[in-house]
Image (tube, grey):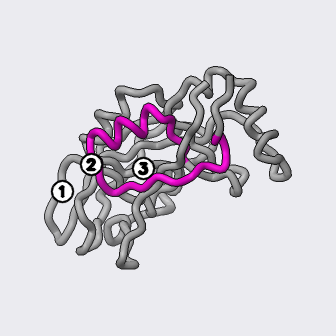
Amino acid sequence: MKFPWTTLDTEVIAHTEHQKMSTGYNYGAENSVRKLTSLSLIDFQPNFHYVEFPTLCAHVDLISSIPMPDGWIVSERFLQLLQRHRLPPHRVYPLPVRQRNVDVSGYFFVHLPQLDIQLKDEYSISEAECEFRKREDFMSLDLIPLYRPSRFSYRFVSRELRDSIEAAKLTGMRFGTSRLFRTAVA
């Protein structure tokens, strides 16, 4: 089991503008990004049309995926690094991006549904960790996306993945202190 873990999230940005889908995007369509779910992988090709980066958005390696839930917008560099680690079931989609009416290449959307684990809202930290310890297949991963219950909602990364990210000097992300998986376990 890989302990301790940390959380990984996008950096807090100074401006309030966020990524959005292209003007006129049909959120009600059958292949809309709104059909992405935190519960499972999807069985269709989502229509991204294109994602508009805000004018002030820097081209970093991890960008908030505001218009698309339960995943990350990542650079090709970050995607290559992730693919060298043990990841949960996920799908990667090339992401058409525009900024100031100019195409921006080299970005992908990584859809990361929650692992198949049922944690109750009332679970203590030790009870939640116990549920994970029962699943060696989960604990051998380097990335654990958790959305429910909301009090444990983070993307948890192993020490190995964090060290790789830091060594590669990837940008646009910050690490936090994990509520779960803080201590080494034999």
Q: Is there any visible trace of residue 2 in the rendered image?
A: yes
Q: Position of residue 83 (x, y in %)?
A: 36, 29
Q: Quote the CA–CA distance across marks 2 and 1.
A: 8 Å
Instruction: Please report the bounds of the magenta region as a residue range.
Output: 155-182
- Between residues 137 and 3, which one lies in front from this camera angle? 3
Label 3 – label 1 distance at C-alpha:
16 Å
Judged from the image, the secondary structure of the residue bearing numbered disc 3 is strand
Residue 10 belongs to magenta span: no
Sort mark 2 into few (<14), some (14-19) or many (20+) by Cα contacts within 10 Å.
Answer: many
> In the rendered image of this protein, does residue 32 appear above or below residue 127?
below
Q: Position of residue 124 (x, y in %)?
A: 82, 47
Q: Is residue 167 left or right of residue 99?
A: right
Residue drawn 42% across the image and 35% down it: 161
Q: Which residue is mark 2?
A: 107
Q: Nearer the viewer, mark 3 or mark 1?
A: 3
Residue that badge 1 annotates: 104
Element under disc 1 = strand
Residue at numbered disc 3: 72
* CB within 8 Å, label 2 to label 1: yes
Q: Is residue 32 visible?
A: no
Local secondary structure at mark 2? strand
Q: Residue at x 24, y 64 (%)?
A: 58
